[in-house]
Amino acid sequence: MQDLSLTSQSGFEDTTLDARRLLLPYSLGLIALCVALQLYIVFDDNRIGPGAIISTAVIGIYCSAFAFVRRRELGQIRFGHVVAHAVTYAALSGSFQLHAAFLGMTGSDALSTVDNDLPVAAGWFGMTYSLAGYWAIVLVLHVIASVAKRGFES
């Protein structure tokens, strides 16, 4: 198994920067927030209403704060920033995709639309198709840029 750590060369302290210690707590916290968001949506009759949108924004603030506060450490771990970005995409977008798939498989009316221009209800359309599609483009660009920099972004 490959060692995923880098040792600080600061001279003042000898700390080990480990991808697991940095990204695992973030990932688990993010997954917990996404599960809580999807449970909120379940208890709100599977609607994507203002509460779900605000909760999604709170998750976005959590992710942005992590990326900002830990930007130096993420930049020292090979592909650290892009791994955090990919985990965020998979957890948040994936939670909406799985929820919508479950609703579709169970024949829920929550996905039904009153607007004939969209295949599903507007809230679900935004959180599944639009969120996943546009974010995927940004994630691919981030991966390309990260590979061009050989994985280190600091």
Image (cartoon, helix red, strand yellow):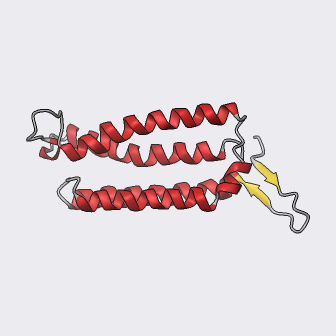
Please indicate whether residue 120 sits to the left or right of residue 31 in the image: left
Q: Nearer the viewer, residue 18 or 52?
A: 52
Which residue does the image show at 14% across and 32% down from the upper left? 117
Nearer the observer, 123 or 29: 123
Please report the residue visible at 49 percent of the width from the left and 48 percent of the height from the top. 88
Q: Can you name the residue that lies furthest to the right here?
A: 11
The one nearer the camera, 101 or 75, is 75
Horizontal arrangement in the rendering, residue 25 relative to residue 120 (left or right): right
Q: Viewed as shown, does residue 110 lie left or right of 8?
A: left
Quadrant of res 152: top right
- Quarter of the image with the N terminus in it: top right
Q: Position of residue 50 (x, y in %)?
A: 24, 60
Q: Residue at x 57, y 48 (%)?
A: 84
Q: Position of residue 90 (x, y in %)?
A: 46, 43
Q: Quadrant of residue 101?
A: top left
- Residue 133 position, x and y percent, is 38, 34
Find residue 147 and report its image quarter: top right
- Residue 58 percent location from the top left of the image: 40, 62
24 sits left or right of 95 in the view: right
Number of marks drawn: 0
